[in-house]
Image: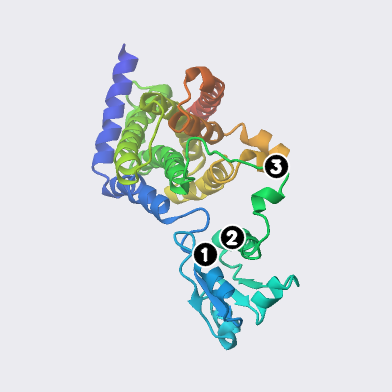
């Protein structure tokens, strides 16, 4: 009973310290508002509003028709461009796509001579260049087949493919990106908050005051974990309701309660990792340097940025030991696919096992640092 009382009161002390730390409060507010909304609203995966220019040397009905089929929201209305300025605008990066329709293009097509049409692509615009070139190629192919009187492209293929997108019918990239941003920010804050809280006490001398009290390392560590866990879970819930669902309009089909419980379990593992890193560092700057090679692989290799299947097999096995890998999988399954416990329990079990392992290692290291 005394142990629970100690953990409760120490946790309240952590919350009080956070209350008066204006820098961390400001960072918390930024991480769960602006840092979620701006990437999700501003970063578009795919072709959107791509700039196009057209050099029309043919001046025919067909060339004007090709310019008209490129329409918003994928493409801007093509801008007429003189041939002499083609290289100049490509070098300056003014347009992502420049289409050159040669002279006699319509006449050669109707005569069955298969004329060539040039598409210049600014490949430095990586997010749109390759996908946009494929879009333009398919659009022009369909238009040219129709214009030349041949059969529709769908009739030329032996199999007709019909694609249906589940859970995100319109393929809105911002939906998934918003949730991944929350997952990434949870990872960063879980490690940073607990690690800096421990180092702040060591640097200010308050940790020495705690050691003269009838407190154990387990009580001190659990107090830091539950207090920081509470703050991050509440911020996550508020961000999902206000930023993701209201501001961005992302429909979250799954159970919010189940996701918050899984988030708390993930925070148990991540905060223990933060305490472990803090015991290895002697100052806050050292802790920051130690966190970089830990946090970045957790963010980039957890399956949020690129699918795990696209990684080397040995790396996939290594990342199974990271709690962020299971949390990313759980987040998408619960929030978008409305998966229940009967579906996600293997990842939940793995996350719990990793959390207990991290906690045991961090507790042993914390006790050793207190004794030294």
CB within 8 Å, label 2 to label 1:
yes
Expressed as whole percent of the image width and height from the top left, the position of residue 68 reads: 50, 68
Identified at 63% across, 64% down, the residue is 144
| Residue where numbered disc 3 is placed | 159
Residue 369 appears in the figure = no
Determine whether, in the image, residue 177 is placed left or right of residue 135: left
Task: Determine whether the residue tagged by mark 3 lies in a helix, strand or loop.
Answer: loop
Foreground of the two, 193 or 182: 182
Q: Residue under label 1, please give it.
A: 69
Q: CA distance from mark 3 to mark 1?
A: 26 Å
Asked if the residue at tag 1 contacts the one at tag 3, i.e. Cβ–Cβ closer than 8 Å, the answer is: no
Residue drawn at x 62%, y 65% is 147
Q: Is residue 153 left or right of residue 125?
A: right
Label 1 secondary element:
loop
Taking 266 as reference, is 160 left or right?
Answer: right
Few, some or many C-alpha atoms within 10 Å of disc 2 (few <14, some 14-19, many ≥20)? some
Residue at (49, 43) in percent of width and height: 281
Judge left or right: residue 25 versus residue 104. left
- Which is nearer the N-term, disc 3 or disc 2? 2
Asked if residue 172 is positioned above or below residue 253 in the image, the reply reads below
Mark 2 and mark 1 lie on one chain; the one further toward the N terminus is 1
Q: What label sits on residue 27 in the rendered view? A: none
Q: Residue furthest top?
A: 1
Secondary element at image label 2: helix
| Residue 169 picture location, percent across and down | 48, 40
Front residue of 61 and 341 = 61
Cα separation, mark 2 vs mark 1, equals 8 Å
Q: Earlier in the sequence, mark 3 or mark 1?
A: 1
In this figure, which residue is indicated by the disc labeled 2? 139
């Amino acid at each position: 009973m005394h142990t629970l009382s100690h953990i409760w009161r120490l946790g309240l002390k952590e919350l009080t310290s956070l209350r008066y730390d204006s820098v961390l409060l400001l960072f918390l507010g930024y991480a769960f508002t602006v840092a979620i909304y701006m990437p999700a609203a501003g970063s578009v995966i795919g072709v959107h509003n791509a700039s196009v220019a057209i050099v029309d040397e043919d001046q025919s009905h067909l060339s004007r028709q090709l310019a008209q089929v490129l329409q918003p929201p994928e493409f801007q209305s093509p801008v007429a461009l003189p041939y002499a300025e083609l290289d100049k605008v490509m070098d300056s990066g003014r347009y992502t796509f420049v289409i050159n329709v040669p002279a006699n293009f319509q006449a050669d097509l109707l005569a069955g001579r298969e004329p060539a049409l040039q598409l210049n692509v600014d490949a430095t615009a990586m997010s749109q260049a390759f996908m946009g070139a494929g879009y333009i190629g398919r659009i022009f192919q369909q238009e040219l087949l129709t214009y030349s009187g041949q059969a529709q492209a769908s009739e030329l293929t032996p199999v007709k493919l019909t694609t249906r997108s589940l859970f995100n019918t319109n393929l809105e990239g911002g939906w998934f990106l918003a949730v991944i941003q929350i997952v990434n920010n949870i990872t960063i804050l879980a490690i940073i908050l607990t690690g800096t809280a421990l180092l702040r006490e060591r640097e200010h001398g308050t940790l020495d005051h705690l050691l003269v009290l009838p407190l154990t390392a387990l009580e001190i560590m659990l107090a830091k974990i539950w207090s920081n866990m509470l703050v991050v879970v509440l911020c996550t819930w508020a961000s999902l309701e206000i930023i993701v669902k209201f501001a961005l309009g992302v429909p979250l089909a799954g159970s919010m309660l189940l996701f918050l419980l899984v988030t708390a379990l993930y925070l148990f593992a991540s905060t223990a990792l933060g305490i472990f890193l803090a015991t290895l560092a002697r100052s806050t700057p050292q802790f920051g340097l130690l966190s970089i090679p830990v946090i970045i692989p957790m963010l980039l290799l957890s399956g949020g940025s690129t699918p795990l299947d696209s990684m080397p097999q040995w790396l996939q096995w290594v990342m199974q030991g990271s709690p962020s890998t299971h949390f990313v999988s759980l987040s998408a399954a619960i929030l978008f696919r409305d998966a229940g416990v009967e579906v996600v329990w293997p990842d939940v079990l793995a996350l719990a096992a990793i959390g207990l392992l991290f906690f045991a290692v961090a507790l042993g290291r914390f006790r050793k640092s207190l004794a030294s």
